[in-house]
Image (cartoon, rainbow, N blue to C red):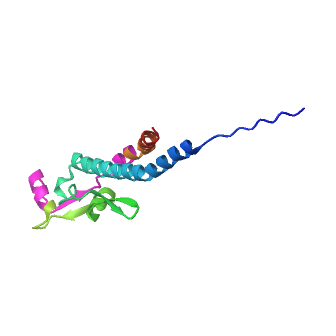
Amino acid sequence: MVIALKLRVDDKLVRDKLGRIAAQIGPATHEEISQISKDIANAIAVNAKRKGLVWTGRLIQNIKSTRKGKSYNITMPLYGIYQDRMKPHTVALKRGRKITKWAREKGFNTKHVYVKPTPFIKAPLRQQTSMIRARMKKKLGDVVR
């Protein structure tokens, strides 16, 4: 004797719910990635200010998050990268340079100053990127609910 059990499930409600969720995932992830990018740029700018890089022109004001197509980039002037990664070297204190004005205010009365890099990018970048997975998980959890 064989008993056949036939089940029929109306999955229209499930498909509708999943369709709404799928439609909301794209904009939610772009919104969260945009916010993460802005937070990273802000953390780098705060760390640059904390390290005392206010003499380097408009570096802190020009650290920004920009969107190009589907990707988000952190932009800053090239001298910010140089300030972060340069090799130690001497700089001549000539008239008209910002470093000369800075050196005179600090009390240097020489013709040259020995400068070293001031790493300010790596620490906030590491801190912010360690939180990306948790933030995305929370955002996607909010979309599903």
The quadrant of the picture occupied by the N terminus is top right
- Residue 8 visible in rendering: yes
Q: Quadrant of residue 114?
A: bottom left
Q: Residue at x 28, y 58 (%)?
A: 83
Which residue is more in the foreground, 19 or 55?
Answer: 19
Q: Residue at the far right: name it.
A: 1
Instruction: Identify whether 120 is placed above or below 8.
Output: below
Percent x, y of residue 139: 41, 42
Q: Residue at x 35, y 59 (%)?
A: 73
Which residue is more in the foreground, 120 or 118?
Answer: 120
Q: Is residue 31 left or right of residue 107?
A: right
Which residue is more in the foreground, 51 or 27?
Answer: 27
Q: Is residue 52 left or right of residue 86?
A: left
Q: Is residue 110 magenta?
A: yes
Which residue is more in the foreground, 64 or 54?
Answer: 64
Instruction: Identify whether 142 is placed above or below 39.
Output: above
Instruction: Identify whether 7 is placed above or below 41.
Output: above
Number of marks: 0
Percent x, y of residue 100: 13, 61
Q: Is residue 126 magenta?
A: yes
Q: Residue at x 17, y 53 (%)?
A: 54
> Residues in magenta?
100-127
Q: Quadrant of residue 98?
A: bottom left
The quadrant of the picture occupied by the C terminus is top left
Q: Residue at x 55, y 46 (%)?
A: 15
- Residue 119 visible in rendering: no
